[in-house]
Amino acid sequence: MSKADVSLEHLFKVFTKPENDDSTLAKIERHLSDNVSDFLSRHVVAKKTSLEEIEQDFMSHLVPDQPEFVSTHAELLLEKLVSHSVNTYSPTFIGHMTSALPYFQLSLAKLLVGLNQNLVKIETSKAFTPLERQTLGMMHNLVYNCDEAFYGEYLHSAKHSLGAFCSGGTIANITALWVARNKLLGPSRDFAGVAKVGLMAAYKHHSINNLGLICSKRGHYSLGKAVDVLGIGRNNMLKVDNSDLRLSPESVLKLGTQYQAQGNKLLAIVGIAGTTETGHVDPLDELADVAKELGTWFHVDAAWGGATLFSNTHKHILKGIERSDSVTIDAHKQMYVPVGAGMALFKNPHDANAVRHHAQYILREGSKDLGATTLEGSRNGMALTVYSSLHILGRNGYQLLIDKAISLAQTFARLINQHKHFELVTEPVLSLLTYRLRPAHLSAMGEASASQVKDINSELDKLTVSIQKQQREAGKSFVSRTRIEAPQYQGAAITVFRVVLANPLTTEQDLVNILNEQVALAEAHEIWQQLSQQVLSRIA
Amino acid sequence: MSKADVSLEHLFKVFTKPENDDSTLAKIERHLSDNVSDFLSRHVVAKKTSLEEIEQDFMSHLVPDQPEFVSTHAELLLEKLVSHSVNTYSPTFIGHMTSALPYFQLSLAKLLVGLNQNLVKIETSKAFTPLERQTLGMMHNLVYNCDEAFYGEYLHSAKHSLGAFCSGGTIANITALWVARNKLLGPSRDFAGVAKVGLMAAYKHHSINNLGLICSKRGHYSLGKAVDVLGIGRNNMLKVDNSDLRLSPESVLKLGTQYQAQGNKLLAIVGIAGTTETGHVDPLDELADVAKELGTWFHVDAAWGGATLFSNTHKHILKGIERSDSVTIDAHKQMYVPVGAGMALFKNPHDANAVRHHAQYILREGSKDLGATTLEGSRNGMALTVYSSLHILGRNGYQLLIDKAISLAQTFARLINQHKHFELVTEPVLSLLTYRLRPAHLSAMGEASASQVKDINSELDKLTVSIQKQQREAGKSFVSRTRIEAPQYQGAAITVFRVVLANPLTTEQDLVNILNEQVALAEAHEIWQQLSQQVLSRIA
């Protein structure tokens, strides 16, 4: 491979001389601008199916000594990286929460790097700081709907914060619970506060054995990380068994009362608005009551479901979210911006002061530097992607997209229910649902004994894993899979296909094709064939 | 303002129809591609100087109902946002660690959004997962220089991790100390480990009063956040006074021994390789000895200085970094990639397992999903920007850039020393230095009494603050400021200009102009004029 010169002159060119119009990178850019779907379908060819094979292209641990020409490198990226990426724009990629994005986001990405602002402080972001504050204010208003005087006072206040932009929902959840912890165990007349003296001293001062957090078994794994990082410990994440996949307020009240009576203190109750696996929404309004009764923080993880608030048709599902103390929303999920735009929002603009910090060269007392209350330090201007999307799609545009996604999920549920070889496991509440293949002749399973059902489910689990993998590797479409406690099997855990119907370009025909492909793969599968014989003979 | 239709048809266009070639966004993109410096100098006009004035454009807390046309919105962005951003590409923007970027990063940013991969799991990233692992491996090798067999075994191992990509250095520092904490207080035969039972139980089990961290007074403020978040408490961050701006190994040993003798346990010693304010590098090799003697984790925060390892000329300054347990490096600092590319590296590939976690639908046991050992969840493919930069600049290219930056800092130090109206406060070790204006007639200050020196310094502090602000607002150039304990004033804190000479396009003439501008502003300043009279009369 030809190598470039190692000279300051060559390097200066890399910084100052744009790529030619006929360079590979310029061509890539034009192709993306003209037709991103076409770019992806041509280049994401996924010839290698196993990760081990792909890894062969990424084996060297040595930083190459000599510079490579940009064009040589770009060719390699197409061949080794792009060709084996995932086509998240594809309408049949319905397994995860990443989907097609509007075109203007491509241009904004370039603008962001051209500007390369750092939002930790005003000196390296200037107008981006008020832009981010406004964006957080708009999202705060969407959730909490406070009045004009409120935003007039707090939107740009140096002493307050309506929320924090984060790289994602995990950091947002940690930020919210960090604030909750530091507020609960904050400084008082005779105590310096947990931020200064640490958890051990805070527990002693407050005479508590443990801090605990209550959420449902479907709580996102980031909550586990949060209690781990914050020093609370995973055992103190009290997961309530929720047989209908929603957190039961009665169980929470009972558990919380018991827990606090044992010398512990509840840090927070976390309600989920759109669980990652099935899209269920906890009964937020009733949970707000329980939080009030127990005197604890109420956090809502609406990383996925928060955008439902744009829809007048469906926002009632999230009723009660406006009573929470904090909310997590990921704009890179249902708000159609690129990955990296999480937000933690705080109802009370004073709360973030529980984690306020300063330095000598930035974040000085009284400054409006955003970094004074964020967990992250240097951050890029991702708020722009959300700001622009709020303007270019608008509340009404988002409503149409959300309504369409939920309606498509209902259509898919109907298709599954109508198909003799499928079993819908969880109904869509938002635009997620789970289902599995179940050969038609097993419909007599209801009559089978518990141990027979268990055996069959175990075989079906293996079938689901195998079909999901085969379908993914075939490369035409992608659904994900998970294990959930299925209400219809008395809470026994079964493996299911999981779909997220967020891509506005997905059609009913795409869904029909996905089901047909799964049936075709299944009918050729040995488990399917064995099940036909064994099970029929057993049940007969 | 004209508003777009609210219809699914219109929205589909936003997702599927590219912008016209003569649209504002397309023009912005072309201008960026053709000449990013020219784009910035034309559009970053900064007519409004006060933040309050800029805020007027970002006041509404309401998500607009109706969609805006993309072109209308893009015009507004140019007018309201871009015009009042910071020109970080400018060769005279030498106040912070963000600088000009190579052109290819603009194209990569667009490619990243076109692909929109999520690196938390292979199912949404595929080839990006091995690419990120390889990039971490190359950086690991740069620091730890292990042999081929080592990387052959660990680079792509599902059970190991050489590091974690993070949104920035703060998350990298937190990640490193989280791993250190969970390893130190990890599970044993009769203890479930801090991750499960929390800090309180872990302290009790190990019979320790407190966990502590030792670093210098120049430690980055993110370390304070780390001990806060991790539940250790800011009071347990033991900051060693370091009169020569480097952490004294003797003091650390003494303090650490004392601290542990009092029933506490040291979590870590943190050495800084390139302090944010002055660029000093702690004596890493000797600190490694002390860490060994005290039996504690040794973390090096090389967010800024890590890239010095590319230079055979200067890497000796970081000697001992290869003996650390973990290292933080920010590629968006001296590696010239866009903001958002931090890394935590671990010498021992087993260590990250102290924070390993799983979920049902991803990060399954045995998978190579990167998210199983990262603090963040969903993340974009920033590793690509580093991977490409390592190839396109190469180790030798980076060496030239690093050497040039350090040499330019030395040139600047010489200019300052030669100028009668300036005082160099800290010599450049890497490419940072601090200085201040000091009228020539004050050179007799050495003869002044302590209280006179204090008074004069207090006046000079005000002058520095004021000139820094005036220069920033004039918009031609930017240096930052901070307060440091100056060795030449017996450790008294003074306010200084702080410069970071990272931009490869900055010339000696730019530096001369910056000094001349400061002198011109100062000579017109009332403090300068008063000082001339008052001080002369006092000292006389």
Image: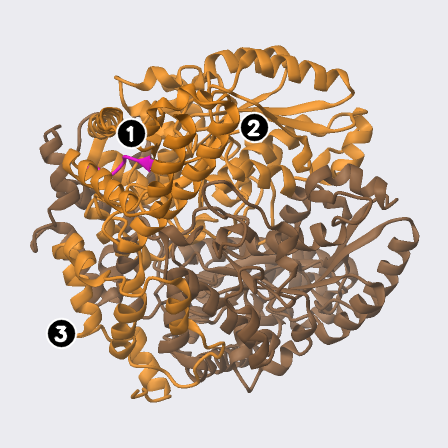
Chain colours: A brown, B orange
Q: Counting other residues with Cα less than 10 Å from the Cα at mark 2, is it few (<14), some (14-19), or many (20 or more)?
A: many
The Cα–Cα distance between marks 1 and 2, rounded to whole angstroms, is 56 Å
Chain for disc number 2 = B
Q: SS class of the residue under badge 1?
A: helix
The residue located at (37%, 88%) in the rendering is B6
Instruction: Tell me the quarter of the image containing the C terminus of chain A.
Output: bottom right
Numbered badge on residue B470: none
Instruction: Verify whether residue B504 appears in magenta.
Output: yes
Position of residue B223 relative to residue B31, above or below, is above
Labels 1 and 2: the sequence-earlier one: 2
- Of marks 3 and 1, the one in the foreground: 1
Q: Which residue is mark 3?
A: B22
Q: SS class of the residue under badge 3?
A: loop
The x and y percentages for residue B147 are: 38, 17
- The kind of residue tagged 3 is Asp
In this orientation, does residue B369 appear? Answer: no
In this orientation, does residue B442 appear? Answer: yes
The x and y percentages for residue A57 are: 29, 36
Quarter of the rendering containing residue B334: top left
Position of residue B207 relative to residue B53, above or below, is above
Q: Are marks 1 and 2 in contact (CB under 8 Å)?
A: no
Chain for disc number 1 = B
> The magenta stretch spans which residues?
B498-505
Position of residue B540 relative to residue B103, above or below, is above
- The kind of residue tagged 1 is Ala
Q: Which residue is mark 1?
A: B440
The x and y percentages for residue B181 are: 64, 31
Numbered badge on residue B351: 2
